[in-house]
Amino acid sequence: MQPDLIVAIDQGTTGTTVLLVDGARTVRGRGYREFPQIYPRPGEVEHDPEAIWGSVLGAMEQALAGVDTRRIAGLGITNQRETTLLWERESGRPVANAIVWQDRRTAPFCAELKAAGHEPAVRERTGLVLDPYFSGTKIRWLLDNVAGLRARSEAGAIAFGTVDTFLIWRLTGGQRHVTDATNASRTLLYDLRGSTFSDELCALFGVPRALLPEIGPSAGILGRTRGVPGLPDGIPIAGLAGDQQAALFGQDCTDAGDAKCTYGTGAFLLMNTGPEPRLSSRGLLSTVAWRLEAGPARGTAYALEGSAFVAGALVQWLRDGLGIIASAAEVEPLARSVPDSGGVTIVPALTGLGAPHWRSEARGLITGITRGTTRAHIARAALEAIALQNVDLVAAMQADAGRAVNNLRVDGGASANDLLMQIQADLLGVQIFRPEMVESTALGAAKLAALGVGLPPVDKGGETVRMRIFAPTMSAGARAQHLARWGSAVNRA
């Protein structure tokens, strides 16, 4: 029997999706498991690493039900990035909860580094800004706040990883401590041009080199399964990329200038900039798109990225915080019940503002409320807020890249919301292309793994040939009014 199936693990912020795909990248099995979010104090977000691992096993069991596992040719992983885990090398036990990418507890340390004048050099070296978003300051916080942890780390007893590294450790029975360049480039410890972790950056952030994993390819053999419930030993782990880079690959954005936006907990817009990193002067990030050892796109590709911390999470807040809706699915019909937001504008700075503003101190804001405001107006304003954040990102990206975004490919759970996609097209003034399969993140992991084990390639665009196009219908004048109102509200947040 010739193995022909790929298992794609998409480990996200609120849950894990596992897809089983065949040689044509058609989904043959699917599993999903949520896990709890932990909020110790305002601005702090944590995950239990064992809950993450349990969600992976549960989703995989569901996806592989009734499948002959001898058909599995390889395994691909894509993951929430920046989220920081430390565990004991000997036992594999986590030493603390994971600090999630949304967490803002290290803002004071970032401010100290900025005040000391370190940000320009850090930005030049890493392509990133000094912000609590990234892993480096989270590692330092754990080392300084868990008793005895720094000494144990310096002695080599502790391992650091983003979620991908932790999962590979578990999937290989503790045999492999490895990440890839897409995840490494999100730590503030990775030299973008040198393609390795930097001793100078480790010293600046107080991170012992002994903690750090090996850096492997995004497509290639990174390890083999060992002792995983429901899987035979020896399956190659052959594809690896952070979630947004995986979505870029999954959407076939393999040429310079190709762009996509993923709508998940946050909104993430990436543009492929080709084989050389391009630094931003407008608050965007420069990051590794992927590093391939095989295939026509072999080598390292880079991307410009803009991130909005809150997108789908805003709809969750309407449900869980305000009780305006009972389920996320209700937001679209509720928002459609009114022709516009009635002048209401929401700035969803629930965990600060990301690119291009980078204001960790910003807080959420709702303006324009009158006696006539209803929950429907607030629901519509929430969808507009998600879209307006992306307008800011696209404007900065076009200026940095020196080229227009003529259209935008979209994916992620919230992209299934037709009204949101139409609002996005209207406010950007460009066409939005949504593929039939919006799980491009998992698809990207599957495609990288297939490449890594040498399965025959699928024609570029074959998976996303069936698309729905959302064309802008809003007048230029109405668009300008929306943007002016939004800009004023952002300045007050």
Image (spheres, helix red, strand yellow):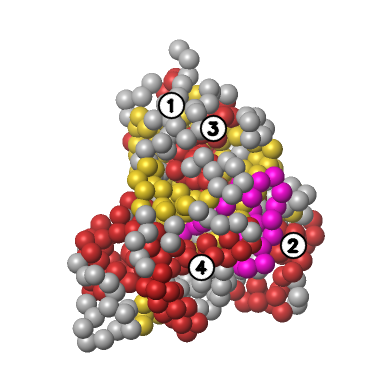
Specify the amino acid type for callout 2. Glu
Q: Start and end of the magenta stretch?
A: 265-289
Which disc is residue 124 wearing? 2
User: Which residue is tagged 3?
Assistant: 449
Mark 2 Cα-neighbour bin, 10 Å: few <14, some 14–19, many ≥20:
some
Q: Element at badge 2?
A: helix
Please tell me which of labels 1 and 2 falls first in the chain: 1
Q: Is residue 368 left or right of residue 327?
A: right
User: Which residue is tagged 4?
Assistant: 392
Specify the amino acid type for callout 1. Ala
At x 45% / y 12%, what residue is drawn?
1
Task: Let me know if residue 311 is in the magenta part.
Answer: no
Alpha-carbon distance for marks 3 and 2? 32 Å
Q: Is residue 271 left or right of residue 476?
A: right
Which disc is residue 24 wearing? 1
Dividing the picture into quadrants, the one containing residue 96 is bottom right
Specify the amino acid type for callout 4. Asp
